[in-house]
Image (tube, helix red, strand yellow):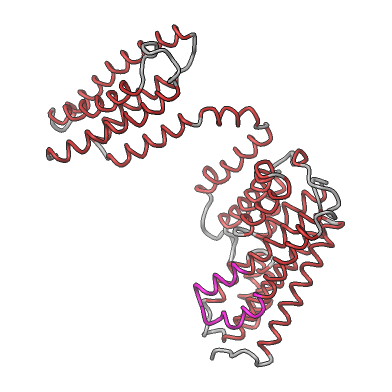
Amino acid sequence: MTIDDLLLRLTIALGIGLLVGVERGWKTRTMTPGSRAAGIRTFTLCGLLGGVIAALAQLAGPGYGAGLVIGLGFAVYAAVFTVLQRDADRAAGSFSATTILAGLLTFALGALAVAGDSRVAAAAAVAMTGVLAVRTEVHGWIERITWPELRSALVLLAMTFIILPVVPDAAIGAAPGVNPREVWLIAIALAGVSFLGYVAVKVFGAERGVLVSALAGGLVSSTAVTVANARRAVAGEGSAGLLASGVAIATALSFLRVAAIVAALQPGLLALITPALGPAALVAASYAIVTVYWRSGDHGGRIRPEAFSNPFSFWPVVGFAVLLGATMVVGRVLAETFGTGGTFVGAVVLGLADLDAVTAATSQLVPEPLGWLDASMTILIAVVANTASKLVLAAVMGRGRFAVEVAVMTVLCWLAGGAGLWLVTSGRFAVPH
């Protein structure tokens, strides 16, 4: 290590201590000078001390010598700092380990900045300071959180970071088989959208929360938004009109998502599908705007945020994901069994569950074995099937006015898309060859 590199690393160690010290000093700024064990200067020196100890350890050479120097230095430092902070807490009548842990971590990060990756040390210091700075907000949030919210968040995190990595990512059973990872991703999407809607209502308020969650959820799965809003509509957790407007927003985003996938994989198909998808997306978005703003006084009762008592139910989510996974398998079997002639049938069945997959797969089949017009029709058939599935979900799960609202929106989208499709098939738009 050159002298310039060593000076730079020691400066970073000093900066780490200064960063933590500023936060700690600001928290104790009202205390009488001399009544606190560690403030800005002390934490700054702690970070520098860690760097210096690590630099001295380099002189011991590679092997156990360097580790022994750092270990002994840290042990002595930890003992002294802990005793001083303990006495300061006793004098102040407080009981907290936060400052002690911050002091120990400041020393360790200062040492890491010199002996290891200084970028990691700096990033960790920023993260630690951020955690220390949001103490009041975190405590207030903990006081307001309910057990169903905490349980649902833990279940969703476990589904994503514990179960998903170990779920097999290969087809099981006879061809084409079932991919457990795909099914589990559907379950995560359904649970995530439902939980997102719950959080959005709590944070942004009833009406804005439903719309924000629909916007975010529509980027992932419009079907998941439909399921979540249908469940809340039938449970009486809010306005059927407003919840249906969330489905309309997610539907519009699903149309735009299809166009984006086609643009990325096979731009030539845009001239064929945009005349249908464009008007349909415009109608869905317009329907949502009309429902939210022009008929704001006719929602059939405003949403009560306290009615959202359960972010999501685990087993119904998993069961519905399995059903969608089975639908995907059936669609693949039909497509493979009947060959090119079964493409449209496969698009209908697959479109019920996974519109993005149908769009991506079909875009790859142009110009062979599918022609431009056949490929565009396959994608549009899948889109129609997907919107039809939302209509069925609304009727079966949501029922009542929610189902009627979704049905009206769906039919209007079909009419607008059909008019655009007629313009294409009548020769008013050029078709690529």
Whether 75 is drawn above or below 50: the answer is above
Q: Residue 424 sits in which quadrant?
A: bottom right
Task: Depth check: give the residue in front, 144 or 269.
Answer: 144
Whether 332 is drawn above or below 398: the answer is below
Identify which residue is drawn at 73% across, 46% down. Answer: 206
Whether 154 is drawn above or below 97: the answer is below
Q: Which residues are magenta?
A: 256-278
Task: Depth check: give the residue in front, 396 or 57.
Answer: 57
Task: Depth check: give the residue in front, 120 or 172.
Answer: 120
Please state if 396 lies on the left or on the right of 387 as rendered: right
Q: Residue 337 sits in which quadrant?
A: bottom right
Identify the image quadrant of the C terminus: bottom right
Whether 250 is drawn above or below 33: the answer is below
Identify which residue is drawn at 63% across, 64% down. Answer: 253
Residue found at the very far bottom of the displayed protein: 427
Q: Residue 295: x percent and y percent?
A: 81, 59
